[in-house]
Image: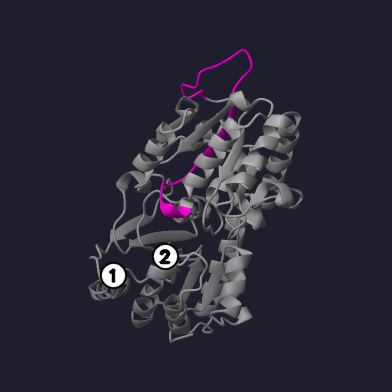
Amino acid sequence: MSQPQIHIAHIVYSFATGGLENGVVNLINHLPENDYRHSIICISKHEPKFFSRIKTNNVRVYDLHKKPGKGIAWLVACWRLLKKIKPDICHSRNLNPLEAQIAAWFAGVSVRIHGEHGWDVNDLNGGNKKNQLIKKLFKLFVHRYVALSKESLSYLEHQINVPANKLTHICNGVDVEKFSHDTKGDDFGFSTTSTRNFVFGTVGRQVRVKNHQQLLDAFIKLKQSDIPNAQLAKLLIVGDGVLKDSLIAAAQQSEYYEDICFTGHRDDIPQTMAAMDVFVLPSLAEGISNTILEAMASGLPVIATNVGGNPDLIMAEHHNSHLVEVNDVTALSNSMAQYLIHQERLEIDSIKVREHCVKHFSIESMVTKYHDLYTSLYQQKVSGRGKTCAA
């Protein structure tokens, strides 16, 4: 007799373009389809176009349409939904969905998992005492925590006092074949010369935490310098968001606007990254960045701020040269300049970063770890060792 499918309810705040959400898509698409079925519960709502990225069957999405404010109506709705769909496992992610664990407890969900994917936008270093208190209270309802970065793992153990035997470290993975390319991509309208352009690029929502202004300032500083090949440098900024107009306005104030391209939202990220030479991520905070993984899978050297899980991803030999401090425009500009001064490094580093990504961050490795986690906790449940009460 075949084993019944494990039903997982993934609880997220919303299901739209974002790193956390993209990680859920990758996980669902690569878990064994015959072994699982999935429900995605959105505290607010989902974007149908983004949901269409899920290619596997047996997936349902539900919107709770939480209204602004602190009301508990959405929690009641979540409890009713969980009672109706009866998942075997509830897997919430990040701060807001953590509260759904109490609904899962009342609904009798036997296995309750919570993932720490990165800091809240209003708590960029995890120091907010209110958030810490919430996490300490709700840990009573969680059987297992998944920390994506080593920083999050340490935070849960030492700040939230989660016992070590309830902690699991699973880093994001990337589909390395999807981001493999042999030819240069679109030139995005940059003017060309007899010597090809050198494109620095970034991908991400244009919101405060992504800190695009540091990259824009560093690029302008680079263009103003007298280093060799500075005239070849171009900047490709991919994504959309509330700060897009102000970033474009800032770029227009410089004399290098023609060397900067804002693409807006793109669905063809592998092809877009194929147009880049070096990837730059100047975030104020990060968990485990999917865009860094995608860049490395594309063979792009990565320069990033020294925050969150970024040091977990970037090769150890690049830590001193490719990790810079938040808002240190000079350091970022200098790090970018090294690839213009020593262009022979690009081909060597391109091979190294892709090999590093394939070896350590394949999506198969990530999926295997989640599969083992889900099946082991589920087996504990069916054998009678799982608890339906508070952990």
Rendered residue at 62%/12% (across/down) = 194
Q: Would you name the residue on which mark 2 appears?
A: 122
Tell me where residue 384 appears, x and y as whole percent. 51, 84
Q: Position of residue 51 (x, y in %)?
A: 36, 48
- Residue 2 in sight: no
Residue positioned most to the bottom: 389
**Relative height, residue 41 to residue 276 (above, below):** below
The kind of residue on which mark 1 rests is Leu
The stretch in magenta equals 186-209
Q: Residues within 10 Å of mark 2 (few under 14, many from 20)?
A: few
Q: Is residue 357 above or below residue 116?
A: above
Residue at numbered disc 1: 81
Q: Position of residue 311 (x, y in %)?
A: 66, 56
Question: In this rendering, is residue 383 above or below 300?
Answer: below
Q: What kind of secondary structure does the magenta stretch mostly adopt?
A: loop
Whether residue 206 appears in magenta in the rendering, the answer is yes
